[in-house]
Structures are given as structure tokens and as C-alpha cells.
Image (cartoon, rainbow, N blue to C red):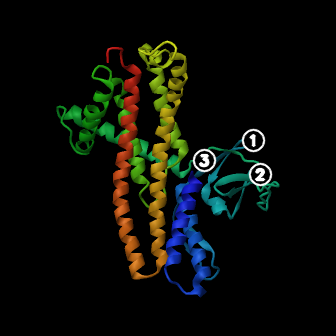
Amino acid sequence: MTNFFQTFSLTILIALSSSYSYAIEEEKNELSLQEEITEYINHHVQDSHDFSLFSTKDKKTGEKIYIDFPLPVILVDEGIKVFLSSKLGHGKKVVNAGDKYYKLYHGKIYETNSEGLIEYDEEGHVINSKPLDLSITKSVFTIIVVSLLMILLFVSLAKSYSKNNKVAKGIGRFVEPIVIYIRDEIAIPSIGKEKYKNYMSFLLTLFFFVWFLNLLGLTPLGVNVTGNIAVTFCLALITFLITNITANKTYWKHIFWMPGVPVILKPIIAPIELLGIFIKPFTLMLRLYANILAGHILLYSLIGLIFIFKNLVGSGLSLVLVFFVSIIELLVALLQAYIFTLLSALYFGFAIQQDDH
């Protein structure tokens, strides 16, 4: 799916830029610019071992110089090897760790020789061995930062309540209305007044976690955590586990022996209901992943048009589109957090409902 969106965005860039009249002699430079924009989009939507802030070119040598924030690389390969990602030089350098050599190639670290040789099979696949990579990538680092921020927010809210007779002060005034809304408009209607408290901590954590990560994805830091299928898979998996572990007998009865249905149809309906247990978290995972990833690619494609048009009208129009799409993406960031939380609450409610509901 990532390749589809990347190809689609590149097609838009080429189609729009080719419709604009440029001199024939600039065609090679145009193609190079389009390739550079596509490379930048790919780099943004994928995880990496550092935070690339910006890059420039050396006027004398023409080499690209990266200004970035390095992160620790942790490799398990006959022992634990730790070094900063700056030693990898964005894939241009070979790192000597112990008695082995490693090189970054297309976002992955491979074991090589001292020359950094990458070997391929007949189908063009890399055959170099890969160590177990437990590095603190930019996605992992962002998750840690957001987790600490959430702890700070909730601890501040709790202290504010205890010191001011249950009246929020300071940053708690920002958090309190959202907490109350999630409780009154999502948890209680979906789960019920009797058992909603059992799920409130998870629902609050889920909402703020997804929301903050979505917002950070709109910054120039190049963060795309919720646009990573592995992250959305883990979130959906947690919802799946909580739903089925806390489910009551009524829930499983409706799946394997649906009440109110003719006996002859029950063996037919049971496999469909069982399949639905896995389809729900699967769609939950894909919805968040696809919406965030598509938004990022669209936004950066529009930014790329500013540099392709090279004139006041085209670049100005692209800039206006970037502004409005950015506003929409702010709303999407909140909406996707709300939808993920609401659907999770609904699944919890289905799992604990009684026959008389």
C-alpha cells in the first residue's frame, strides 16, 4: 500500500509539472527534482535511525550534507553493539563494531566487509546477513516522548484535583474537558455505566496517544508513527486482546450459537461471526494507517509542487493548497484518534453486553 501511495503521488507531480510550460533544455533538471521530491517523501513516511532536520550541498564537492539529530543504534550480533547513527553517514559510511562491519542500506543495517560491499542474488535481493536491530529509531523515540508527555499531563491533572477540591488548574484545564467528553460521550454510551470505569484508563491513553502522535506527524520533524503499519497493528492488537479476554458468555454465545436463528443456519453463521472477530481489529488497523499515510503523502506532494512550478502563480497556488490541506490534516489528526477510541469502546461494549440489552 505504501508503494501505491508513493507511485500515485509521483504520478500527480509528473502530470501537473509536465502540463506547465518549461523550456526543453530544463527537462533533465526537472526529472532530477521530481526524483528528489519522491525520495524526500519516501524518507518522511518511513522510519529511520535519526532525525533529519534538513540537508544542503557542498558548493565545492556537490555532496549532500545532512543536518540531523543522531539516535542510538543497538545491534545484537554475537554480542550487543551500540553506537550513534551518525557513524552510518546516511548509508555512505561503514561502521566497524568489534570484529564486524555494518552499513545502512535502504533503511536497514546489513553486515558487510570493510569496503561496505552489498551483495545480491539473481533476483536483485540483498543477501547480506542482518543483525537483530533493537535501535532507538525516530518512531521509537517519538513514542517515548509522547508517553512521558502523557504521564506529565495525567499526573498534573491528578495533583490539580487533589490540591484544589477537585477543580482543575493549569494544564489540567486543557485535559479535563477532553477526559469528561470521552467518559460521557464515548465510554458510558458504548459500554454502560456499570463497567465503563474498567476501560476508561485504556480509552484515555489510546485517544491522547494517537492524537499526539498524529499532531507530531504534521511537524517538520519527519515523524510518521501512526502512518506505520506496525504501530497501528499493535494498537489494534491490544484492543483485540482486551475485547476477547474481558468478554462474557453472552458474547461467545452470539458468535458460536447465535440465539434467535434457526438451528439449521447456526453452523453457517458461526464461521462468519468468528471471522468478524479478526476483521474488526484488522479494519481498525488499516483505517488509521491509510488515512494518516495518505495525508502525509498528499501534503508533501503539494509542497513539492512549489519547487516544480518555479513561478509566482503555480507556487502561490500550491502554497494556498498546502495551507488548507494542513488545516484539514489537523482535523483529521483529531478525528482519527476519536474514531479509533470510539470503535474500541464499541467493541468493549459488545463483549460485555447481556442478553436483555
Residue 328, placed above or below residue 355: below
Dot 3 or dot 1, earlier in sequence: 1
Residue 296 % position (x, y): 46, 57
Observer-nearest of 17 and 272: 272
Residue 139 % position (x, y): 52, 49
Residue under circle 1? 78
At 32% from the left and 18% from the top, the residue drawn is 357
The amino acid sitting under disc 1 is Glu
| Res 135 label | 3
The amino acid sitting under disc 2 is Lys
What's the CA distance linking mark 3 and mark 2? 17 Å
What's the CA distance linking mark 1 and mark 2? 10 Å
User: Mark 3, mark 2: which one is toward the viewer?
Assistant: 3
Observer-nearest of 1 and 235: 1
The amino acid sitting under disc 3 is Ser
Residue under circle 2? 100
Dot 2 lies on which element?
strand
At 63% from the left and 75% from the top, the residue drawn is 63
Residue 336, placed above or below residue 27: above
Quick one: label 3, few (<14), some, or many (20+) residues within 10 Å?
many
Looking at the rendering, which quadrant does residue 107 occupy?
A: bottom right
